Amino acid sequence: MLDPVEIPLSLYAHFPWCVRKCPYCDFNSHQLTASLDENRYIDQLLFDLEADRVLTHDRTIETLFLGGGTPSLFSADAISKLLSGIATRIPIAADVEVTMEINPGSIEQVSRLAAYRDAGVTRLSIGAQSFGTSQLQKLGRIHDPDDTRRVAAAARQAGFAQVNLDLMHGLPGQTVQDAMRDIEDALALAPDHLSWYQLTIEPNTVFYNRPPALPNDEMIDTINEEGARALRDAGFLQYELSAWAIPDHKCRHNINYWRFGDYIGIGAGAHGKLTDRGRIIRTTRTRLPEDYLRSPNRKAAPVAEGERVLEFMICCLRLHAGFRLEDFQARTGLPGSVLNPFLNRAEERGLIARDQEAIIPTERGMHFHNDLLALID
């Protein structure tokens, strides 16, 4: 039986505006073409939150994530208003993790970052993407490498103990040496977490319509191998397909996603997952910011039992630690025996290892992640 009280709860708030839309980005982001009425948007986020309060079942929010788009286009006062407004509606854990995404081209002052910290933000995620000037230009980014260096230094000066850098590889025209130089430059800033992921060309993007020349598969494999070695040598542990952290600095919010936990999603285009009375509910909001400001147009639909296995596996098999059978049962409401056909096939191919309690992707299973998921009925 699905018991929501036993499932951790997070909250994601989406900020849909950017200074400029990047050509690779398929997120719900929109170029800011007029003045930003931040108070109106914050008010709508809090109004939006009311719709999901009944599904929280008096749980405490363990983590919050302010993503985008570019949340750092909003002032510290606006962020404070949002976080305090959330706290008056839903209990928040005393040790809550509050992550905010920062675009290096939108902010660099220590005082402003300190104001975000005072507002309740505990963790910054800086969208570096690359330290190559030409690469950043090809990616359509509004910042340069020195902007990232200044923001990372300012984050520490402002008192942030948790700082993530987003870094991409497999970029247009990138060599193995370029990718390794990016990692070296990132490590020089002493982050405690790196989100290191490969550029993929997604539909409805400029790159999809006009594909750039990307490194071939052999180069990508070399980048992955040499990059992983460099990160391990620097004391980082890979705990998820694209996530590396020094000990005790994993992103708790993302772990809750990958463990099939619950999360409220508010903001234009936001998605949520909530457990309620034996059901798993997926929620969505309208995508266009101007429509959202008129009405969030929240929609909710139950996840069919037949879809729960795939959704759970898509999440949990990203984690190096895998998952426990008891967690599968607690978070899907299904008996562990329904996994046996998949587990047998995956084990025969050397993609997972298992014992009486846990299912863990092997190194081969992590490398051939899509092949592993393809075995699910």
Image (cartoon, rainbow, N blue to C red):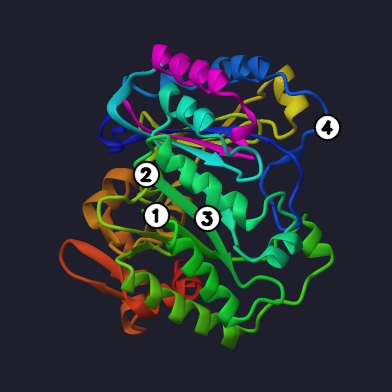
Q: Using the image, determine if residue 216 lies above or below residue 312.
A: below
Q: Position of residue 4 (x, y in %)?
A: 32, 32
Of residues 233 and 283, the one drawn nearer to the viewer in this rendering: 233
Which labelled disc corresponds to residue 32?
Answer: none
Could you tell me if the residues under marks 3 and 2 are in contact, i.e. CB atoms within 8 Å?
no
- Measured in 3D between alpha carbons, the distance from the residue under mark 3 to the one under mark 1, in whole angstroms, is 9 Å
| Residue 33 badge | 4
Based on the picture, tell me whether residue 360 belongs to the magenta stretch.
no
What's the amino acid at mark 4?
Thr
Q: State the mark number for residue 162.
A: 2
Which quadrant is the N terminus positioned in? top left
Label 2 environment density (alpha carbons within 10 Å; few <14, some 14–19, many ≥20): some
Residue stretch rendered in magenta on the structure: 60-89
Q: Judge from the rendering whether residue 156 lies leftward or rightward of residue 51; answer left or right.
A: left
Query: How far separated are the C-alphas under marks 2 and 1?
Result: 8 Å
Distance between mark 3 and mark 4 Cα atoms? 26 Å
Identify the residue under disc 3.
Answer: 166
Mark positioned earlier in the residue sequence (3 or 1): 3
Q: Which residue is mark 1?
A: 193
User: As shown in the figure, which amino acid type bears the numbered disc 2?
Assistant: Gln
